[in-house]
Image (cartoon, rainbow, N blue to C red):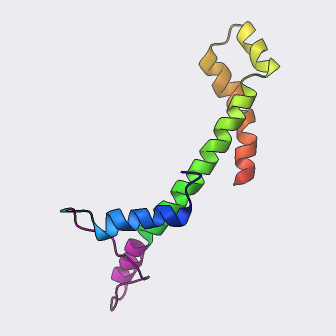
């Protein structure tokens, strides 16, 4: 999803979830910020209903970018000498990854935030 343009993913979500495909009806509005004459809490719910697809689109693209950076950093860390030393001392692989590799691999990911 990282290489997919966000506008294309948004259009795909609108086509599938707003317009509907075949016998499946659309569940979300195709455009606009709100439907019309609503007041109070119903207006808040209406605006939230209109924001579902844009939020899902942006979260999916950003989440994919974060996962890609985390995976790349973790693969770089897995060949480090201190991890080989931890394995030689007898630590299990899952502990080596969780306690030694992941905290160091998270540094570039946290920088993105």
Q: Is residue 76 left or right of residue 21?
A: right
On the image, the x and y values in percent for residue 71 come to 64, 36
Secondary structure predominantly adopted by residues drawn in magenta:
loop
Magenta span? 24-50
Q: Residue lying farthest bottom? A: 37
The image quadrant that residue 68 belongs to is top right
Of residues 12 and 57, the one nearer the viewer is 12
Query: 3 left or right of 56?
Result: right
Of residues 58 and 105, the one nearer the viewer is 58
Q: Is residue 64 left or right of residue 37?
A: right
Vertical position of residue 72 compared to residue 33: above or below? above
Please state which of residues 20 and 70 is positioned toward the viewer in this rendering: 20
Residue 24 against residue 41 in the figure, above or below: above
Q: Look at the picture and state if 52 lies above or below 87.
A: below
Asked if the magenta segment contains residue 74, the reply would be no
The answer to whether residue 20 is left or right of residue 83 is: left
Q: For residue 42: magenta?
A: yes
Residue 36 image position (x, y, % from top left): 34, 89
**Residue at horizontal 69 percent and vertical 55 percent from the top:** 113
Q: Residue at x 48, y 68 (%)?
A: 54
């Amino acid at each position: 999803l990282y290489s997919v343009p966000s506008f294309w993913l948004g259009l795909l979500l609108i086509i599938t979830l707003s317009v509907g495909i075949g016998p499946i009806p659309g569940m979300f509005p195709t455009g606009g910020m709100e439907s019309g004459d609503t007041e109070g809490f119903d207006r808040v719910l209406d605006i939230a209903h209109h924001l579902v697809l844009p939020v899902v689109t942006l979260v999916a693209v950003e989440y994919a970018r974060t996962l890609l950076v985390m995976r790349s950093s973790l693969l770089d860390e897995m060949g480090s000498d201190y991890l080989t030393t931890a394995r030689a001392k007898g630590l299990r692989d899952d502990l080596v990854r969780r306690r030694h590799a992941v905290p160091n691999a998270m540094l570039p990911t946290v920088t993105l935030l």
